[in-house]
Amino acid sequence: MIEEDKNDNIEETENEELYEHHKFIADKGQEVLRIDKFLLDRLANTSRNKIQTAAKNGTILVNGVAVKQNYKIKPEDEVSIVMPYPVRELELIPEDIPLDIHYEDDTVIVINKQPNMVVHPGYGNYSGTLVNGLIHHFDQLPSKSDDFYGRPGLVHRLDKHTTGLMVVAKTEDALTNLSKQFYDRTTERRYHALVWGDVEEDEGTITGNLGRSNKDRKLMAVFPEGDFGKHAVTNYKVLRRFGYVTLVECKLETGRTHQIRAHMKHIGHTLFNDLEYGGDKVLKGTTFSKYKSFVQNNFALLTGQALHAKTLGFVHPKTKEFMRFDSELPSDFTTVLERWETYLSARDKN
């Protein structure tokens, strides 16, 4: 429990009508850290300002007591974020969001996710997500059953700024079937990524456990095999070399969080314009201001990392037919590639 002399940054709150949305327990070795920084490292798609606002509103509890944003986390503290409404109530808001549908039947739907879109609601992102759009779309289907409402059958996810193909289950049977396919690694997933540097080998395999970074829990890091994290394997193949950057195809054997982004950074080829992993800086090339301006103009064309889920294959849960879908690169990604092509051609002529 919190000691009496710490009450200068703790407020009592009535929580009989509050619902827990997130819960974290600080490790035994937890360093003393402000609670807003502690939560910022653990909550995706949020900001310190949103966390501080939540603290001011009395919705951040430590050991059952509301705290201010300057409260210092101690080992084994139990941190909860509570709201005056149930979690599911947030997740059930249908929104008429345009969806790029590649395929749909009564069992599955294949979506081409757009950039700058969060897949599912979470702290600080309760609306405008792909799930909100899917719920609205499913609600328009005459065959939709009432008990399926609000459960769009996600079996995998894409990062906010990653574009490309996702399959979503429309029935419980399909959800179970597809989940097993992803677990058994029998699906086909190929991504196109623009990475910094001239990748030395034409193709290769990256094997390395992935786990939360010790420095920033919003990021993933590669750890020695068997030491920490989960087993992850990424196969890559060079598609086009532009000197300072390389277009590669990545084929996933496993589907870990940030797998391609963390694996490529691990081998020294951070994704181009990856805002979180440091790819939004000039990592390769000349020191000329003209070149720096060229790169920054390319950054401005993209909302985030140059990563696109281009190909998706799976066995249809109902027909048992193997289905493979392919999607075009987004126009901003294509434009950046064309600009690098022009730059490379001009450089070779000089």
Image (cartoon, rainbow, N blue to C red):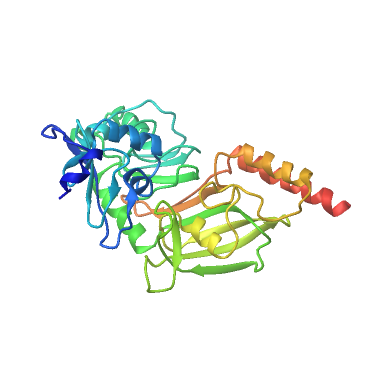
The residue sitting at 78% across, 43% down in the picture is: 290
Q: Nearer the viewer, residue 315 or 298?
A: 298
Q: How far across and how far down the image is residue 185, in percent?
A: 39, 62
Reply above or below: 56 against 250: above
Residue 135 showing in the rendered view = yes
Q: How far across and how far down the image is residue 134, in percent?
A: 35, 34
Residue most toward the right?
350
Q: How far across and how far down the image is residue 16, in percent?
A: 10, 34
Left or right, 146 with respect to 269, comes to left
Name the quadrant containing residue 108: top left
Name the quadrant containing residue 230: bottom left
The residue sitting at 32% across, 54% down in the picture is: 32
The residue sitting at 39% across, 39% down in the picture is: 48
Q: Nearer the viewer, residue 224 or 80?
A: 80
Q: Nearer the viewer, residue 300 or 84?
A: 84
Q: Nearer the viewer, residue 316 or 297?
A: 297
Left or right, 269 with respect to 232, comes to right
Q: How far across and how far down the image is residue 163, in percent?
A: 50, 43
Residue 322 showing in the rendered view = no
